[in-house]
Image: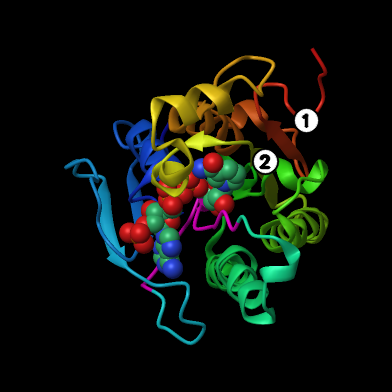
Amino acid sequence: MQGTYVIAGGSHGIGLELVRVLAPTAAQVDVWSRTAGDLPAAASVHHHACDFSQPDGPLPELPERIHGAVYCPGSITLRSFRSLTPADFRQDLEINLLGAVRFLQACQPRLEGVDGGPASVVLFSTVAVGQGMPMHASVAAAKGAVEGLVRSLAAEWAPKVRVNAIAPALTDTPLAARLLSSPEKREALAARYPLKRVGTAADAARLARFLLSDESGWMTGQVLGLDGGMSTLRT
Ligand SMILES: NC(=O)c1ccc[n+]([C@@H]2O[C@H](COP(=O)([O-])OP(=O)(O)OC[C@H]3O[C@@H](n4cnc5c(N)ncnc54)[C@H](OP(=O)(O)O)[C@@H]3O)[C@@H](O)[C@H]2O)c1
């Protein structure tokens, strides 16, 4: 897939897998994150240091034109409502919502599709917005705000830019490492899904690639569940 992409949070997890998928054919893939992680040594891939937990921190330079922008930084805060403080809610809003807002406000003037088509933006929600789950109050509230942002921006930016989100369930990335830290935990969690496994970074990266590509050219304002059937099926 040709074009120029900016992937916030492309150094680990789903974002890194997406960079690996895009790098061989893209003209340029700029990755913004705190560390360079295991980025592929491809000529198209460039790392820029950036920390979205710092509300006033500087943002890196952007390419002249951006065909696709993806914001991956996020959290899995699993705590009872009783134990959550307002500061915990603010922290989740900062990384999941306000970081995405800053990123997209920076990108907006440069978003432009290939050959006159729309540019594409991809954000990340969670299965826990559409389906209530205990211990998810803080992250579900923040990701619910992300879903509102997706639909509002999709309306405001049509027809020039498409805006969609992916709502994964448990996906095997560094973010979820603690939850999947033993074969027993992994097996017990996999059993909760109709498809009997947790997600992989590749599952999510392939969907993100589809949303960036012209193959999804008539989709905007959508939040796509990627959850092994968890949110919609009872088996
Ligand atoms: N994994 C799951 O089970 C799961 C489930 C539901 C939803 N999601 C959502 O899916 C998205 C991707 O998740 P993931 O599992 O791939 O996460 P991940 O493994 O933690 O990777 C997150 C990426 O964002 C970067 N990042 C984190 N904090 C940052 C900050 N303050 N400033 C700049 N970059 C930052 C990380 O790089 P550095 O550390 O180098 O900065 C990394 O490249 C997230 O929004 C997450 O909430 C994930």
Q: Position of residue 138 (x, y in %)?
A: 69, 63
Q: Going 25% across and 51% down the picture, which residue do you hit?
A: 37
Q: Is residue 48 visible?
A: yes
Q: Of discs 2 and 1, which sits in the foreground?
A: 1
Q: Could you tell whether 32 is left or right of 155 in the image?
A: left
Q: Kindly report the distance in space between the C-alpha atoms of the residues bearing marks 2 and 1.
A: 10 Å
Q: Position of residue 17 (x, y in %)?
A: 38, 36
Labels 2 & 1 near each other (Cβ < 8 A): yes
Mark 1 lies on a secondary structure that is loop
**Dividing the image into 4 quarters, which one contains the N terminus?**
top left
Quarter of the image for residue 19 reads top left
Residue closest to the eye, 213 or 15: 15
Residue closest to the eye, 215 or 182: 182
Quarter of the image for residue 212 reads top right
Q: To which residue does mark 1 refer? A: 231
Disc number for residue 167? 2
Was residue 159 drawn as part of the magenta stretch in this picture? no
**Dividing the image into 4 quarters, which one contains the C terminus?**
top right
Q: Residues within 10 Å of mark 1 (few under 14, many from 20)?
A: some
Mark earlier in primary sequence (2, 1): 2
Q: Could you tell whether 16 is left or right of 193 in the image?
A: left
Going by the numbered disc 1, the residue's amino acid type is: Ser
Q: Is mark 2 within 8 Å of ligand 1?
A: yes
Q: Residues within 10 Å of mark 2 (few under 14, many from 20)?
A: many
> Which SS does the magenta portion mostly show?
loop
Q: Where are the magenta residues, as a range?
A: 60-77
Q: Is residue 25 above or below residue 228?
A: below
Q: Going 32% across and 66% down the picture, which residue do you hit?
A: 34
Quarter of the image for residue 193 reads top right
Mark 2 lies on a secondary structure that is strand
Q: Could you tell whether 121 is left or right of 140 in the image?
A: left
